[in-house]
Image (spheres, grey):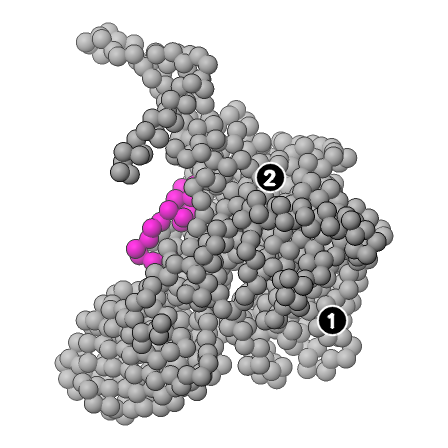
Amino acid sequence: MKKQFFIPILSIAVLLVCNNQSAMAQDGAQYKMDRTVLPIQPPTYAPIEVLDARDAKKPPMFQIKPPEGAPNVVIVMIDDIGFGATSTFGGAIETPTFDRLANNGLRFNHFHTTALCSPTRASLLSGRNHHEVNVGCVMEIATGFPGNQGERSNDAKYFAETLRHNGYSTAAFGKWHETPTWEVSVSGPYFRWPTHSGFDKFYGFIGGETNQWDPVIFDGVTKVQKKDDPDYHFTADMTNEAINWMKFQQAMTPEKPFFIYYAPGAVHAPHHAPKEWIEKYDGKFDSGWLTYREETLARQKAMGIVPPNAKLAPMPTDIKDWEKLSDKERELFALQMEAFAGFTEHTDNQVGRLVEAIDDIGALDNTLFIYIMGDNGSSGEGGLEGTYNELVHLNGIFDAETVDSMLARADDWGGPNSFPHFSAAWAVATDAPFTWTKQMAADFGGTRNGMVMHWPKGFKSKGEIRSQWHHVNDVAATVLDAAKLPQPTIVNGVKQKPLSGVSMLYAADDAKAKDRHTTQYFEMFANRAIYHQGWLARAVHRAPWNNEPFHTLQTDVWDLYNTTEDFSLTNNLADKHPEKLKEMKELFKKEAIANSVYPLDDRAYERFNAAIAGRPDLMGDRTSLTLGHGMTGILENTFINEKNTSKTIVANVDLKGSDRGVILCQGGKFGGWALYMDKGKPAYTYNWFGLDSYTITSPKAIDKDKAEIKLVFDYDGGGIGKGGLAKLFVDGEKVAEGRVEKTQPAVYSADETADVGIDESTPVADKVFKDVEDSEFTGRVNDVTISIPAKKK
């Protein structure tokens, strides 16, 4: 049935091509290319009746080339950084590359994102609203409702696909985070991976964050090991890959323009940077976050980034007064910001290397370079105190660390032994002059990000500010406008939704041009807002660092602001203009229904559980999984979920004497567990966030060529994240037991994996194994089965 359905659709697409070509001749001589239906169809030719090729006239070769003068395109998407962070927009962090492009291009100071990473990226690349393409939130907490399912729709193809079909070479480097979690195993499908989403080349990580020192990297759809380099850092690695690809592509096909989507994991947590970049900011933030905000606003006014009458919006009431902090607290918090600043400048430096490489081959002037500083505001997900291991807070645990315990690891902060995130107070500060942060779709602190557009050959204006109101969904239309390409109406036989965004090029050489993007809704975790012709109505529902909302969905309080007079949203006009507020709320409802925003879902950590959230789970209702030696790289959301329950692991192994290495593991040194052998002795380690570790080891080595090694973990129950009793058996005989006092309730890692016969990333049992090679099992795991009790229905 599927083939019978597809063939007529394809025939209709070809027929549409023919109908749309006003002068198609049988010999192809008057063929007119139709770029609105992709792939572009070749001309048809009359049958050739000449017998001898030497006597026949060859028809013109069909080639697809972009329109004359189509520019190269580079889009840089930095992660988790707010409006008031960088020097380019008045902040205290030096970003010389961002400055350089701004001084020779344009700053946009009314540019907006969705308040969260996956949705912003989906909106950027599709040119549509994020719920409209089914990415209402990050993939790990997708739900079962349309708009939030995490499966990008075929009727909203990415503009990379349009460019590729029109003669561009396309490549993506860095963070993806747009593939459903249940589609990231060896079983695929790969439809929503980068190389099936319009990109010829992909080099990066597939999830939401990565360890910059030990990333899990894919080249296309193949997992690869990081480079063997003592100074390795992922941002530098991906930049090398981007530069090498671009130079090679231009050497081979200099007539073909390129599109590079450059999306580093920076500066999302963990805040990892080479030590010299962190030390550069030593002492720079000792005056605290309130002073930082005041100084940033002053610089923003002096630069014309904000109007002279702009005020600092109040900080959330949870934020502590810097002047009342202890000396230890100030020391810790200053260190946290130093690491973030060093990470940011290091990232901008890597972008600079890409800019220089493009300039070196003489291509920068005709490259449309869109540099977006943040897919949302700075992140408050580190909580009010910050954290040495961000995964603690992702699990909803906020009392595992203290100021003293974090300061004890100050020398490692930002380095390979840390997984840090700064205090939410710094997130608010670097989102100046606004109140809120990432996740807060109801405030410009979560959605307004600095953006620079640079294209010397495309517009004359330089070093100026543009204040037209725009959204990340405008980028696709801007790129197609610059390349003189139409939005396709059909791609691969599927009719396409119209773009939600508009091109921003109208404002490039006209600072006073009237806004063309006049209405935009926002929603994330039920934080929501509607912008319309200068007005903003909003409901602040839940703070990013709190589990509980301020109000129920039914009793949320709505504010109203006139943004043309109130840049930072400080003057709530809800009481003065109740009719306007009512009108705006009705508009939000209309937009929400039209874009599949409803039903709102304000659940937090529960949504990590696929069964609760209602999304697909690769394991489904399975209670066991059997694997063999060499089956590695299994990302967490495609492995059996053994959290908050009992489990049994049974491994049948061949041994060679004093064996060593991992039999089965999940996670890494910042959280996970491992069944392994050391000097012939079986052992089990549960690593609780890298903060506590519990190990059960057999007192004697196994003296057989074969053995059945079994781990039984009896969960205490009574809630989530509880402990239990772990018991080790060899050939049915118990050889050791011990307590695991607590377990991780929701997530081990964004990209650490489960592996058989090796620990492929950072070692779970890091006190036993120093690296991947050291963790390789010297025997052979014939099979290993992990099982959990059946869920009660």
Q: Secondary structure at mark 2?
A: loop
Residue at (55% x, 81% y) in the render: 400
Question: Which residue is identified by label 1?
Answer: 317
Horizontal side, residue 535 vs residue 494: left or right: right
Residue 598 counted in the magenta span: no
Mark 2 Cα shell of 10 Å, populated few (<14), some (14-19), many (≥20):
many
Instruction: Between residue 598 and residue 560, name the one nearer to us.
Output: 598
Mark 1 Cα shell of 10 Å, populated few (<14), some (14-19), many (≥20):
few
Q: CA distance from mark 1 to mark 2?
A: 36 Å
Please identify the residue farthest to the bottom as the structure is shown.
Answer: 699
Query: Residue 674: which disc?
Result: none
Horizontal side, residue 348 vs residue 629: left or right: right
Which residues, given as a range, are shown in magenta? 184-200
Q: Amino acid at mark 2?
A: Gly
Residue at (34% x, 60% y) in the render: 618
How many numbered circles does the render carry? Answer: 2
> Mark 1 near mark 2, Cβ–Cβ under 8 Å?
no
Instruction: Between residue 449 and residue 644, name the one nearer to us.
Output: 644
Query: Residue 501: which disc?
Result: 2
Quadrant location, the C terminus? bottom left
Residue 514 point in image, percent of width and height: 74, 34
